[in-house]
Amino acid sequence: MKLQMIGCSHHDAAVEFRERVSFNADQISGALSRFRERFPNGELVLLSTCNRVELYTSTDDDSHLDRQSVVEFLAGEHHLSVDEVVDQMIYRAGNEAVEHLFTVAASLDSMVVGESQISSQVKQAYDLACENGSAGPLIHAVFQAAKRASKRVQTETQIHRRRVSVPSVAVGEVVPEVFDTLVDKHVVLCGAGEMGEETMRYLIAAGANDVWVLNRSRPRADALAETFGVRSADWSDLSEQLVHADLLIGTTSATEPIVTLSQFEAIQGARKDRVLLLLDLAVPRDFDVAIGELPNVYLYQIDDLQAACQRNRREREKEWPKAKKIIAEETELFLRDLNHRATGPVIQRLRQQAHLLKEEELTRLKNKLGHAGLSEADSKEIEKSFDRLINKLLHPPLSSLRDDAAEGHRRGLVDALRHLFQLGD
């Protein structure tokens, strides 16, 4: 039994292909059920995100669940030909598959290294496999070990604590410099595109509970607001929202500032000198730079935030070797434990059998020689000779067994030794 991974990610496949082979949660449940019907002895975890689609499989019978059969299964799920799929997928098996999973779970293979979302996505994929009965002994072991590896990277390195996207720096590092909390702060998000959506995720994670979305296209604002359980308003309400805002964020694609100095001065009195934080994440800029010169107004522009991102990237790069070392250690530890569990019972039974045979032969020899002509020292020397003989005879097959198991071939020599030495099941 060994683990194999077949999949694609942002590293090696275009988004158009990833979209064609991706699964949503409902589709994954159906796919897992059909997999069990097709491969009753197989195990499968199906990880599908916007940046990767990966199938982690294992079986007791390698001939029935190899690389080709997994590709055929994936192609069939999406009504594609095998040729359309096979050349786009990477393959990892045995040790490489284990190390790859640990690297993914620790967010070292992500588009934004250190982002926290992938860890929960890996856990959700594993939980779905458990719920649908497609997780077996090896899947349980390797995904629990992946969780431990990810936790070590999080706690023993700074990679996850260095934000490297503009919205994450804006919300995670700049906001705390001005506000102790976003709870009950009036937050106005201008723009409902990709940048606006990513920013919204960080706002909600930071505890913001009074968020309004404005967009020139009201339906897009409504859709984003509904997705995150916040409120939306007409673009014409921007001045009114600005009166109440504690935090104003610009993520639009407007070619001119959406808030000019004169517009802000017109409502400044109604604000009663309350503190306002402006986060301008747009290019071109959404807010007139002169607004930042006014009292109680703090303006951060895209250049400021990108500079922070670059500093954080450099700091993450320093942590990269430490994180990779942790992954290597956890991979080695897992494989050693796995191999011990695979070979330990057989080795123990073989040694027990050899010990029983030794005792029988020693007893027969002692009875034949007689106790009078055999000193205690002679008896101990003979016993040591028997032990050395057994160790020398067992060393080559047991060494080969461990090497075979270390390469992921957990049945071949194990079954052969059971059969040759009649060790039973």
Image (spheres, rainbow, N blue to C red):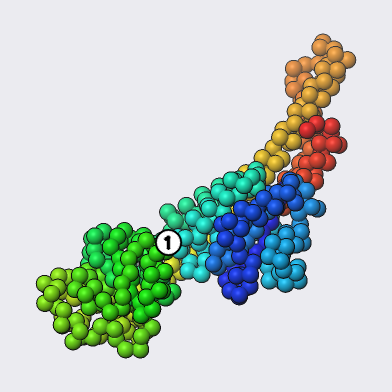
Residue type pointed to by label 1 = His
Residue 57, x across and y down, in percent: 68, 53
Q: Residue at x 61, y 70 (%)?
A: 18
- For label 1, the SS is helix
Relative vertical location of residue 285 with respect to residue 208 in this rendering, above or below: below
Q: Foreground: 307 or 167?
A: 167
Q: Residue at x 57, y 71 (%)?
A: 10
Relative vertical location of residue 3 with respect to residue 251 in this rendering, above or below: above
Relative vertical location of residue 314 with respect to residue 73 in this rendering, above or below: below
Crowding near the residue tagged with mark 1, few <14, some 14–19, many ≥20 C-alpha atoms within 10 Å: some
Mark 1, residue position: 160
- Left or right: where does residue 330 sit relative to residue 299? right
Q: Residue furthest bottom?
A: 255
Q: What is the total number of numbered labels drawn onto the structure image?
A: 1
- Left or right: where does residue 369 sit relative to residue 336? right
**Quadrant of the image containing the C terminus:** top right
Q: Residue at x 54, y 67 (%)?
A: 50
Q: Residue at x 33, y 69 (%)?
A: 232
Q: Residue furthest right?
A: 368
Q: Foreground: 172 or 388?
A: 172
Residue 327, x across and y down, in percent: 55, 56
Q: Foreground: 220 or 298?
A: 220
| Residue 170: quadrant of the picture | bottom left
Residue 384 visible? The answer is no
Residue 22 visible? The answer is yes
Residue 313, x across and y down, in percent: 42, 71
